[in-house]
Amino acid sequence: MSGDAHLTEQYGSPLYVYDLQRAVAARDDLYAALPEGTVLYYSFKANPHPEIARALREGDGPVCKAEISSTGELAAAITAGFDPAEILYTGPGKTGEEVAAALDAGVRTFSAESLGDLRRIGRAADERGVTADCLLRVNSAGTGATTSIRMTGTPSQFGFDSETLPAVMPELRAVPGVRLAGMHLFSLSNARDEDSLIAEFEHTIAAAAEVRDAVGLEPELLDLGGGFASPYLTPGERPVYPNLRAALEKTLDGRFPGWRDGAPRIACESGRYLAGDCGRLVCTVTNIKESRGRRFVILDAGINTLGGMSGLGRLLPVSVGLAPDPVPADGRAEDGVASLVGPLCTPGDTFGHNVSVPDLRPGDVVTIPNAGAYGLTASLLMFLGRPAPTEVITRGDQVVSASRIGFDRIPR
Ligand SMILES: *Cc1c(COP(=O)(O)O)cnc(C)c1O
């Protein structure tokens, strides 16, 4: 029996399994690819599991700070041991209560996305007799590379439009309780390749320099965002970025000559690169059926467990592999194609049609790779009320902990 089948025997199915060693390796690789002295924020959105966050926070070399966007992520970050002074709080719709909870916990750095957002942060800080350091999130007018998920250059709920920022600057400067400490630009996720990533960062650095010159805001902290890629639910290796560091250092030298002395300090953010390849989803085939010539493989994990965004009409190119791997030659046929579906009572609970799968049987334990980021956290956990999957933390082959968030208590 394979390791994964052993795990389901012990902890049930479905299961998320996260290997902390892989998360730490991703962090160390990414730091090695970034300009000297860069601060790397871990975006809790990708996976708020406190043990993953804790592993990213601990180490002998440079470690991660936390980028959060809700009171729940604040709790996860504090549980993971982050000093609130190391936390960056972002998001276009922060409520007064959320800001207050963050300030009371000791968070002092916020990304402000609009005048109303800045005023709300300032009001809560003022009431507490403290000052919040705010990065102005800038939605730059131009565009750099072509990317997977673009978040700037178009009308957006995120950030200040760069072209109208000079006009609102006097109002921003007049907000009590805040200090304008820098800029935050986050323009893409999951860059296609290293060249697009570099082109996007070059554009971002140029845009930040233009804003500095246009509004006279000399940033102490310049958060350049991210875009670092990772395979998602399909086999594949995390990319390496051998040319990124030199390219970014050169661009920064041209636009922000003081950066090597920490003026500004440079920051980046990542969720998927740090957490993506540390996790896999292990689940079980509950049923196989044929319908009108099509084969359906029904898993005990669906959009309630993984990538609930597929419920919004986006089919994910999910890949399943039979555990143990390679598939044993116990009389199984060749790989075939099937519709890969979950257990929920909605046709939306479909991972894909014509997915290439091994010759599966009910009871087979299968693994979906590279599910550490945007897995459970992006799933429709409440939908149809199935229990949450257990999350198993490992260090290599060693199980460190197993836990389950849940709402499945049966009243007695
Ligand atoms: C989602 C998000 C991230 C993380 O994106 P990844 O693609 O997971 O690296 C970072 N920063 C901000 C502001 C985000 O909204």
Image (tube, grey):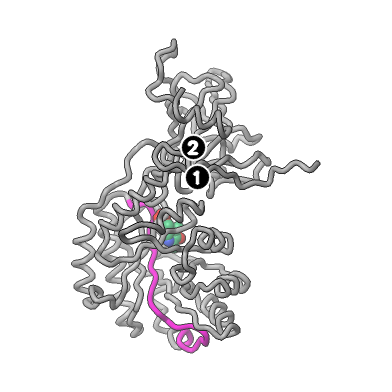
Question: Which comes before the other along the chain, label 2 or label 1?
Answer: 2
Q: Report the Cα–Cα distance between label 2 and label 1.
A: 8 Å
Residue 149 colored in magenta in the image: no
Numbered disc 2: secondary structure: strand
Of the four image quadrants, the one with ligand 1 is bottom left
Give, as a three-letter code, the residue at label 2.
Leu
Quadrant of res 330: top left
Report the span colored magenta. Answer: 171-191
Q: Position of residue 397 (x, y in %)?
A: 41, 36
Residue for point 68% across, 41% down: 385
Q: Which residue is mark 2?
A: 281
Residue on which disc 1 sits: 375
Q: Do residues under tags 2 and 1 come within 8 Å of each other at their CB atoms? A: yes
Along the line of sight, the residue nearer the viewer: 180 or 203: 180
Left or right of residue 206: residue 310: right
Residue 389 appears in which quarter of the rendering?
top right
At x 67% / y 40%, what residue is drawn?
384
In which quadrant is the C terminus drawn? top right
Q: Residue at x 44, y 10 (%)?
A: 331
Task: Reply above or below: 97 against 41.
Answer: below
Q: Amino acid at mark 1?
A: Gly
- Residue drawn at x 56%, y 31% is 10
Does 189 lie within the magenta span? yes
- Give residue 325's mark: none
Asked whether mark 1 and ligand 1 are closer than 8 Å, the reply comes as: no
